Amino acid sequence: MGLLRQTLLLDADDTLWENNIYFERAIVAFISFLNHQEYTPAEVREVLNEVERRSIQQHGYGTQSFAHALVATFEQLSAEPLTAALKETIHGFAHEIAEHPVELIPGVAETLEYLAPRHHLILVTKGHPPEQAGKLERSGLKPFFNAIEIVMEKRPATYREITSKYQVDERHTWMIGNSPKSDINPALAAGLNAVFVPHADTWVLEHESVGISSSMGTLITVERFTALREHF
């Protein structure tokens, strides 16, 4: 890439720090707690996935939305009535996630330290704004970023709004993240370049084929975040 200063839009959850693994552990605990006598754990998970899709539309992302989805799934599947005590227990599965320390993915801090003086770094994350801002503060990574964007969804229009707001050249702007559905494909559809950094535990609702046929931008796939130094 030479010494050309570029704009790097970076995802947060499961790109900079671990996130979905904690939700997965909470789901396993919830399914065990539900202990459904007819549905297999996989079938319960399918119901939860569908409930989560609806919960996101109403409550957005984050642990509060997740707690709503768990309670709604319990109400849908359990023969036992939902008591205040049961609701508190179910909410506890989500609260444990919110209280978990931020666990950086290996090499992220060192890689951002390398990239920050060379390029224009903007954090672009979706989720509940106070939660995401809090995780960023606790991560210690905030000083590396020139700007922070916490958005409700990542659609092509979202990326166009960001490039317009910061008046950056799409040809030299890259979205870097682990989610094909939110990070890679909509950025490519908006005319940007993208770097796909796969994560073994990417949330199932973020799964999608990587890349779009209409993209005019460049798509790069790297095995790990530290490999960004080889490209930028």
Image: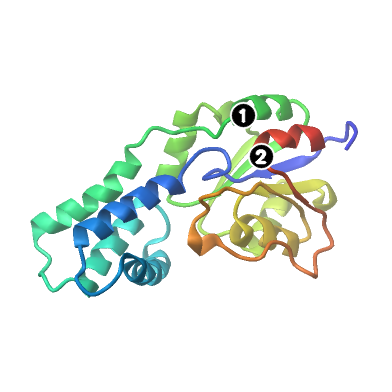
Name which residue lies at 12% across and 66% down.
Answer: 82
**Crowding at mark 2 (Cα within 10 Å: few <14, some 14-19, many 20+):** some
- Looking at marks 1 and 2 on the same chain, the residue that comes earlier in the sequence is marked by 1
Residue 213 falls in image quadrant? bottom right
| Figure colour scheme | rainbow
**Front in this rendered view, residue 96 or 37:** 37
Give the side of residue 25 with respect to residue 136, left or right. Answer: left
Residue picked out by circle 2: 224
Residue 117 falls in image quadrant? top right
Position of residue 133 measured from the top left corner of the image (x, y, whole percent): 46, 39
Position of residue 153 measured from the top left corner of the image (x, y, whole percent): 54, 60
Indicate the amino acid at tag 1. Answer: Gly
Position of residue 136 measured from the top left corner of the image (x, y, whole percent): 49, 35
Name which residue lies at 80% across and 64% down.
Answer: 215
**Front in this rendered view, residue 208 or 66:** 208
Residue picked out by circle 1: 107
Give the side of residue 130 with respect to residue 209, left or right. Answer: left
Name which residue lies at 22% across and 48% down.
Answer: 92
Label 1 to label 2: alpha-carbon separation: 9 Å
Instruction: Say which element carries label 1.
Output: loop
Instruction: Say which element carries label 2.
Output: loop
